[in-house]
Amino acid sequence: MEQGLGSDANSPSGSTIDKTRVLDVKPLRCLEPVFPSPNGMSSVSTPQPSPFVCVPPTGPFPNGVTPFYPFVAPGESGRLGESSQQPPRGGPNQGPFGYGQPISPVPLNSFRNPTANGNSGRSTRVGRSDGADGLVIDDDGYRKSLNQNDQFASGFVVHVNDVENSRTGRKRGRPKKPRRPEQAGTHVEVDVESLLNQLLTSFKVVDLDQAKKADGDKELVGRMLLVFDLFRRRMTQIDESMDGSGSGKRPDLKASNMLTTKIVRTNQTKRIGNVPGIEVGDIFFFRMELCLVGLHAPSMAGIDYMSVKLTKDEEPLAVSIVSSGGYDDDGGDGDMLIYTGQGGVQRKDGQMFDQKLERGNLALEKSLHRANEVRVIRGVKDVANPTGKIYIFDGLYRIQESWAEKNKLGCNVFKYKLIRVPGQPEAFKVWKSIQQWKDGVASRVGVILPDLTSGAESQPVCLVNDVDDEKGPAYFTYVRSLKYSKPFLMPRPSPGCHCLGGCQPGDSNCPCIQRNGGFLPYSSLGVLLNYKTLIHECGSACSCPPNCRNRMSQGGPKVRMEVFKTKNKGWGLRSWDPIRGGGFICEYAGEVTDVSNDNDDNFIFDATRMYEPLEPVRDYNDESQKVPFPLVISAKNGGNIARFMNHSCSPNVYWQLVVRESNNEAYYHIAFFAIRHIPPMQELTYDYGMDKADHRRKKCLCGSLNCRGYFY
């Protein structure tokens, strides 16, 4: 927020104005989206987002490969890597996906706050506080003391915790550092309104019938969350290219505002109990995601409730709570939670206000007597992003008792003891167990080897079997990357970058950014910002350091993994840590080979196969269908953890082709990224693709609803 002094019109008559003290007043921008209230329901929203754009590659490619759409558009050269007279796709004269009509840039800093029920949805920005500012807040930046009607909380407040870019600690009113001369005015114009409309249309989340809006399913919930995440990521990338860092414009707010005005939601019907399409243990990195799928409607308040007519009068009953550490909540052992009610403040002048038995507090009290189930969402710190939160759906609880006591500030507060309903899958308890393994407090059951990489990776990878007596997979040599007998040749030398401090977004002088269509492909947290046919990473000829953002796949896994014995699919791979949608997992290591028909080799990655597009992206654009590429990797004798990733017809992992160039040589790699948020201890799987050789088919045991029945 920019701050400034008052104007001359407000000065006392005859006063003298010191012109040297007049600040440059800039317009106040306050992004506070509010959902309209369909069918008597009130509003809900939350912050965060950013999507993706598919920019076709410009090479290099090996000789002898005939190009076809979407690698080369009609009228372009007949050989990959050769020049064309047409302007490059993805440039300023093309549509947001590199194909289509010229675009009209839309200003990104002009948003009007929607209104709902005559309420402007005005919100108060709340910083982390112990109550001295007159507000008691949850540590995710949302106030439990927020006023709330019987349906939804109105208004919208955001906190820096939900920002993906970790470099967002700039204080309001603080002048920005001037951009480097080489970065000024180098951003690529993108029509974000058109981008969002195409995204919504392709994922079939526009003009949903009333039944889908009221009650969703797993497939629709997945599409909603994927649209939100892709658009949020893409907005981050666009903002960074314009600003140079992305730290001051909050692209997550802009993306949230655009999505909420289009009312992209499901499960709008208030309900007690589980929500269709959401499973116990599912994780969310943004409060907005909880709102979009109906798990917890208020974007700010920690208590969600509804009015129910049980006798002659209506009573408020609690339907869900969010506990993330802002109050004196006691998380217990994973089956119990001591939850503090909403309200109760201490002002700066020392006045204290007790909590009142109203709104959310009253709803919790009524739920105690009615013994209805309450959904519990626990918030934990995001280790990868210290200012962020991860929200875990921990299942259904019942309130066992309530009481009043004084908190550490001296205010009277309400306490509620909740007990988890038995028979549900473990969720928060899994997180607690993993932390005990990491701290050495408890031992992981079934460990065969504490680190099968023998220190090759920065994170140890344990080998675990808690299913049977098998002592491990067949012997192989652990290697971190690809072994090339000869690299692919490039038609012309490719210069390396001279970014001594690492490649920076918006730097037009960086050849690596130029080869990626003017954008850095990764966020500062290592998240892939948009899916592409080919990603250009910095190579050995570049001057940037090993921790450069454009070397993401070169540093090995960033999360703690384990290779484990599955019940019916041999050995598999999963993570101890949560993985964000778009988060890097690992590359496929092994030996590049020309032979892909070795029936004895079960550890083959074959990029020459045809790959089904991601199920939700099936009608998104032509580039969702991967184009076969002449890269075959064998990990039979030597490989890394990727060799243990099993096939699934509904995978949670997606592979990208990555090239690292050095002079006139190109080294292609396969990098794996999360399609969506993946909770700890969930198996990591990808689609092995389809082959013309029917004799190489094997029976698929993935068990998904979309299972084809076989894989290669």
Image: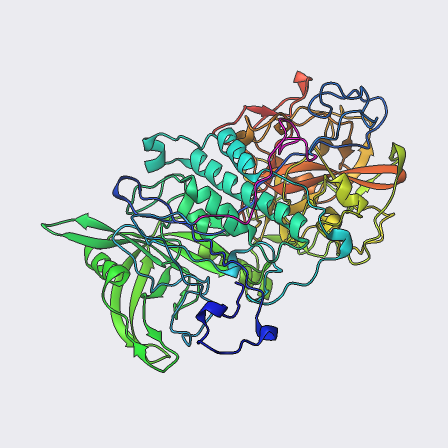
684 or 183, nearer to the observer? 183
- Report whether 506 appears left or right of 354: right
Taking the spot 72% from the left edge, 42% from the top edge, the residue there is 518
The quadrant of the picture occupied by the C terminus is top right
Q: Is 172 located above or below residue 469 in the figure?
A: below
191 or 426, nearer to the observer? 191
* Magenta span dominant secondary structure: loop
216 or 5, nearer to the observer? 5
Q: Is 49 located above or below residue 83 in the figure?
A: below
Residue 55: x, y in percent? 68, 34
Quadrant of the rendered image containing residue 215 = top left
Query: Which residue extends farthest left?
Result: 312
Magenta span: 91-112
**Does 641 appear in magenta?**
no
Residue 469: x, y in percent? 60, 45
Residue 112: x, y in percent? 45, 48
Query: Which residue extends farthest bottom?
Result: 350
Residue 413: x, y in percent? 30, 72
Quadrant of the rendered image containing residue 411 = bottom left
